[in-house]
Image (tube, grey):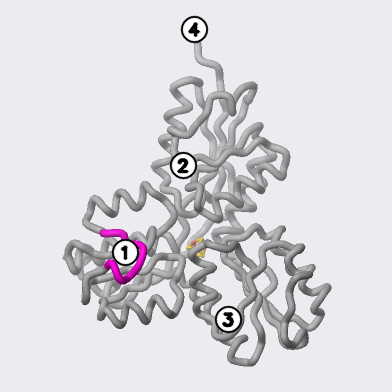
Amino acid sequence: MPKPGLRVVLAQPRGFCAGVERAIEIVERALERYGAPVYVRHEIVHNRHVVAALKRKGACFVDEVDEIPEGAVTVFSAHGVAARVERAGQRRKLQIIDAACPLVSKVHKEGQRYAAKGYEVILIGHAGHPEVEGTMGRIDGRVHLISEPGDVAGLAPADPEKLAFVTQTTLSVDDTRDVIGALRARFPAIVGPDTRDICYATQNRQTAVRALAREVDVILVVGAPNSSNSNRLREIGAATGRPSYLLDSADGLEARWLEGARAVGITAGASAPEALVQNLIDRLGLDYDVRVETLAGIAENVHFRLPPELEEHASQAGAA
Ligand code: SF4
């Protein structure tokens, strides 16, 4: 019996962002330059396939710096770390290479600047996410964490005239606008970057999933369950009325999701490798006669420099 037809539409852009590419390259270059093992605190990016591939090359993942032998080469993840973690690493005389995304570091600096000017800082973000822990731990003084408009009523700042906010980089643009609206309504003097802390990659992938929703019946988001930006993509897809599912890999696909669908859209979070998208298309091809197309979308041309010690090594390796 012939397989039923299925239109598969790929969002553009999707998958790896410049910060994730840089973080992975940092671990690979560190392994080339210093040899295994290279220690990495936390998942370098939120994707177990990426972590497994780096483990095979000799990276050793740990939860805390006190698990790392004194003096060892150590990479801090793309999410950034609190100042106390950096100090703990210095006390162990670790050779630290910081893979924090430059756009996360920018938020750290912004928060530090507000704190230095005497502002109390509000961080809009999700409790427990490593980026949030890192950002809170980089800003001196009291930092209030809120995640939704309803949290604003519970804030009790020392001086409502001296308040600032910053945000996590991977939030939903629309939800964040609502939180900022609630902040401005209660604290008219508050200052902050509006939604500009939400990084280009997050914004572009959110725009792309909205465009995808106009074309398809069902949306599949390839990404890890603990990946903030991947979860936001699924939520935005669902908010358009299209059933939307987050799956770590093709193995997570459930046949019932596609019942009655003629067109399925696929996107991927910023830490999901393109190979996982291709595997998913292959998996769909087992049951359907798939016709794949890619939406026109925003072209990204962002590249972040490596830390100087690895940039030098990269150019030498390239010249060899
Ligand atoms: S999602 Fe944005 S902030 Fe996070 S690593 Fe990628 S570019 Fe940087």
Q: Position of residue 127 (x, y in %)?
A: 58, 63
The mark found on residue 1 in the picture is 4
Based on the displayed image, in which of its 4 quarters is residue 141 positioned?
A: bottom right
Mark 2, residue position = 248
Q: Which residues are magenta?
A: 60-67
Q: Residues within 10 Å of mark 3 (few under 14, many from 20)?
A: some
Q: CA distance from mark 4 to mark 3?
A: 61 Å
Question: Tag 1 or tag 4, which sits nearer the N-term?
Answer: 4
Q: Nearer the viewer, residue 52 or 264?
A: 52
Question: Tag 2 or tag 4, which sits nearer the N-term?
Answer: 4
Q: Amino acid at mark 2?
A: Asp
Q: Residue at x 31, y 64 (%)?
A: 40
Question: Tag 3 or tag 4, which sits nearer the N-term?
Answer: 4
Mark 3, residue position = 110
Question: Tag 2 or tag 3, which sits nearer the N-term?
Answer: 3
Q: CA distance from mark 4 to mark 2?
A: 31 Å
Quarter of the image with the C terminus is bottom left
Based on the displayed image, in which of its 4 quarters is residue 174 positioned?
A: bottom right
Q: Residue at x 27, y 60 (%)?
A: 28
Q: Is residue 64 magenta?
A: yes
Q: CA distance from mark 3 to mark 1?
A: 26 Å
The mark found on residue 40 in the picture is 1
Q: Amino acid at mark 4?
A: Met
Q: Nearer the viewer, residue 99 or 43?
A: 43
Q: Residues within 10 Å of mark 1 (few under 14, many from 20)?
A: many
